[in-house]
Image (cartoon, rainbow, N blue to C red):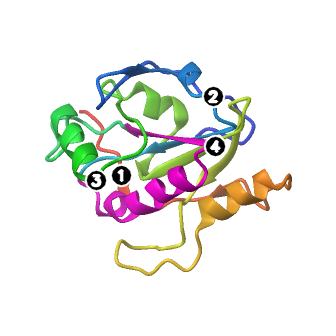
Amino acid sequence: MMKSGQTATNFKLEGTDGKTYSLKDFDKRFLLVVFMCNHCPYVKAKIKALKDLQSKFKDSLQIVGINSNDPDYPEEGFDNMKMFAKERELNFPYLFDETQDVAKSYGATCTPDPFLFDSERRLIFHGRINDAMSPESPVTRNVMEENISTLLSGKKLEKDFDPSIGCSIKWKE
């Protein structure tokens, strides 16, 4: 698993918008890389929160969704990603990690699995978007929003890891 202070691994991945992205394409102060997928109820429950984060912090944050699931798994694959992005009106790039190399290099294990990086692309927080522990649970604390606000105010985070919960990444055989 990637540890706090480690530099983000570069990637070159195709997005559902037809563009190819790498780390250098993102120049905001913060980069939130979220390993996600199409079928997971935890991801579906967090999409609004992710879109809200992107809108609220659009001047200082760029969110990037990466799908590393086996494309042969039900509801996964690039065509389904395109439908997912369109149906949910994603306001951030959704990229396909077909080889699963990016997920492995970050140490991602579940969906959603968020990694927050600073302007030097060093990991500053790995963990949950909010405190809802199941897709049906009410949100009482927006963890990622609080963390970004704390960082924008010049303060340090109390902790750099707060494990996310979700479905396991579906690895190829």
Q: Give the range drawn in magenta.
A: 39-66
Residue 129 image label: none
Q: Name the residue under label 3.
A: 88
**Cα–Cα gap, marks 3 and 2:** 25 Å
Badge 3 or badge 1: first in the primary sequence: 3
Image location (x, y in percent) of residue 128: 55, 60
Badge 3 or badge 2: first in the primary sequence: 2
Q: Mark 4 points at which residue?
A: 59
Q: Locate residue 138 relative to residue 150 in the image: left or right.
A: left
Amino acid tagged 4: Asp
Q: Residue, x 77% and y 52% (percent of image)?
A: 151
**Cα–Cα gap, marks 1 and 2:** 30 Å
**Cα–Cα gap, marks 2 and 4:** 10 Å
**Cα–Cα gap, marks 4 and 3:** 22 Å
Q: Locate residue 146 relative to residue 33 in the image: left or right.
A: right
Badge 4 marks a residue whose secondary structure is: loop
Image location (x, y in percent) of residue 158: 79, 62
Q: Residue, x 44% and y 81% (percent of image)?
A: 138
Within 10 Å of disc 3 (Cα), the crowding (few <14, some 14-19, many 20+) is few
Numbered disc in front, either 2 or 4: 4
Q: Name the residue under label 2.
A: 27
Badge 2 or badge 4: first in the primary sequence: 2
Badge 1 marks a residue whose secondary structure is: strand
Amino acid tagged 1: Ser
State whether residue 166 appears in this view.
no
